[in-house]
Image (cartoon, helix red, strand yellow):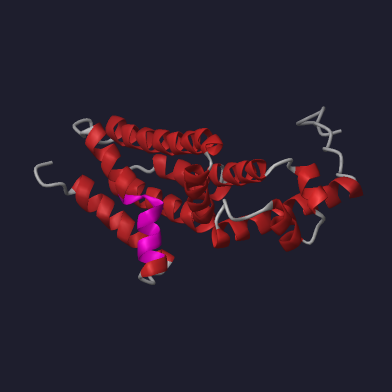
Amino acid sequence: MDPVNPDPAPAPPRPTLRQEQAAVTRRRILDAARRLFFRDGYAATTLKAIALEAGVAVQTVYAVFGSKAAVLGELRSLAVTLPEADDAFRAAMGEPTIERRLAGFAHSIRRRWELAGDIVRVNEDAARADPSIRAGVEAARNRRQAGIAAFVRGIAEDLAPEMDIAWTTALVDALSLYDVYVQLVAVHGWSTDAYEAWLSAQLVSCIVQRPGA
């Protein structure tokens, strides 16, 4: 018995072989759908095509997810909750200077778009094609907006009480849009390091060195 922790929590049970196989199948279907949704578009992608890409029977896709919208919904959940990007965001909120907070925020955005920007694009496209998806996509947008607003309020409360919160929130939102990332990285060939450095510098220039601030 551990004298410091005399009653440790039991270790979680190991997954069964069936559970492991089910998880692998689910992951293969999600990965296949992600590729096809991004390449061909949500509307043009069928469950049959997803099954073929994943190497499973179409009945398996129906059994695991039930519908194409449910597959997209799970991908959207993956994009909304990204531990690496979320950890970077939380670390940024604890930095002691505005400049370091903005640099940390830029890093969190870079990681979010690197890891799941394609899912964001797919969801935006899907919402235009399928009205039933719009509520879920709008909820994801609202979560992003809430995170940016909380980040800016934290800077104002801790470091810059004179800050125009509404103006700064709008600026941070606009500069960190996925479309900007795509234009610089995918269209113009910037590295993701260059994008992060640019975003950090722009945020500092516009917020910290704002004319008249």
Specify the quadrant that holds the N terminus: top right
Q: Nearer the viewer, residue 182 or 88?
A: 182
Q: Is residue 97 visible?
A: no
| 1 is higher (above) or lower (below) than 73 | above
128 relative to 165 in the view: left or right: right
Residue in the foreground of this view, choosing between 104 and 174 = 174
* Magenta span of residues: 175-185
Q: Name the image quarter holding residue 213.
A: top left
In the rendered image, the vertical position of residue 117 relative to residue 14, given as above or below: below
How far across and down, in percent of the image, does residue 95 sit?
38, 43
- Give the image location of residue 198, x and y in percent: 31, 61
Residue found at the far left of this picture: 212
What main secondary structure does the magenta stretch of the protein show? Answer: helix
- Does the stretch in magenta take in 177? yes
Residue depicted at 38% across the width and 33% down the height: 150
Left or right for 110, reference 83? left
| Residue 100 rendering spot, x and y as whole percentages | 34, 49
Nearest the viewer among 32 and 153 is: 32
Q: Position of residue 48 (x, y in %)?
A: 73, 55
**Residue 204 visible:** yes
Is 138 magenta? The answer is: no
For residue 70, what is the image quadrant? top right
For image coordinates 28% across by 40% down, the residue present is: 170
Question: How many marks can you see?
Answer: 0
Give above or below for 151 relative to 182. above
Q: Which residue is at a point 32% across and 32% down the rendered structure image?
A: 153
Extreme bottom residue here?
189
Residue at the location (66% across, 45% down)?
A: 68
Residue extending furthest toward the right: 17
